[in-house]
Amino acid sequence: MSPQQRLGQKEFEVAVGIPAGSLDERTKALLEKTPLLFSALDDQAQAAARANVAEDIDRGFTVVGEHRASIWRDAWQDHLDDFIGSGHALEALNPRFVGGTVLLRWQGAYIEGVTERFELAFLEIFRDWLFRTYLADASHLYEFGSGSAFNVAAYAKLYPQTSITALDWAPAAVKIADLLGERHGMKISGRRFDFFAPESGFEFAPNSSVLTMCALEQVGDRFQPFLDFLLAKRPQRVVHVEPMLELYDPDLPHDALAIRYHQQRKYLSGLLPHLRSLEKAGSIRFLKVQRLKFGSRFHECFSVVAWEPV
Ligand SMILES: C[S@@+](CC[C@H](N)C(=O)[O-])C[C@H]1O[C@@H](n2cnc3c(N)ncnc32)[C@H](O)[C@@H]1O
């Protein structure tokens, strides 16, 4: 294992695809405050990591879909219980599945996080940058598939005056969002929503922006009802942070594993090519398509696709 390295300004700029030296002062300060330290792995350790990951994938994972509704219902009920039990502490909303593994994916190789809960620490800094870059001008933010509501809570801290709706099919997720409004005075409320069956009567408030984070991944290739809903209801901007199958390179062994994992779980597929065809047809405009090349042991949820209806 090589000596410790640090994900600093230069590395962050490469990951999010902005010119060298252009990172804003706030993100620089956040990277200073929470040093993101990791160890690189040598060739032998890379090969061992690939073999371990491949073995895990061979053992199999559950596939996404309606049959997992009860799994999400129970997961968020546990978080709701913890949230209430903690006296509504915001830290209780950090999902258990974020930052649980030491082995991570970074710029086409495996690394080991040294900073505690490295993935969560990175996510918090990245999310802050993302919100300020793409979602600062929203009069109303809607997060679809909001889960524990930790993203909307972070957004509300940055933009306390902006109304926020957190939507999910799990009742406990909706309840947590409502509690953030009631107990923390945040302008957040929850609402039930199913990606597979969006309500036709739903209307966005003026100047609304939409966020999905590691949520649309759950619909597999059945993104069309939600996309049709967005195109019909026309929010001003849509920002996805999702694992994007089409941004992996199947010729690279490191990426091939993420592809196998993604396909085994039947995660999101086809959305990006579909959006590209809409862009060609002049119906939408892309603001960003960027794979950060950062992820957990098995895959990378951190690909940004931001677009606006034309
Ligand atoms: C991996 S979690 C991500 C949650 C949150 N966005 C985050 O960043 O932690 C996926 C979320 O999508 C929700 N979800 C899955 N399928 C859904 C569907 N068909 N309609 C609405 N929400 C769904 C789950 O309940 C869960 O909250």
Image: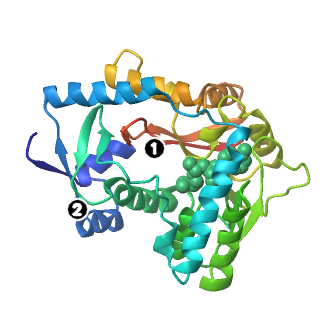
Disc 1 Cβ-to-ligand 1 distance below 8 Å:
no
Residue 60 in picture, x, y percent from top left: 49, 28
Q: Which residue is farthest front?
A: 59
Residue type at mark 1 is Phe
Q: Quick check: can you spot residue 76?
A: yes
Q: Nearer the viewer, residue 127 or 168?
A: 168
Query: Which residue matches tag 1?
Result: 302
Give the image quarter of residue 128: bottom left
Q: Quadrant of the N terminus?
A: top left
Report crowding for label 2: few under 14, some 14 to 19, many 20 or more residues within 10 A (C-alpha).
some
- Percent x, y of residue 200: 90, 48
- Mark 2, ligand 1, within 8 Å: the answer is no
**Residue 206: % across, % down:** 77, 63
Q: Which of 36 and 139 is in front in this view?
A: 36
**Mark number, residue 213:** none
Residue at the spot of label 2: 35
Quarter that holds the C terminus: top right
Of the image marks 2 and 1, the number of the one nearer the N terminus: 2
Query: In the image, what residue type sits under mark 2?
Result: Pro
Q: Please, is residue 44 above or below residue 39 in the view?
A: above
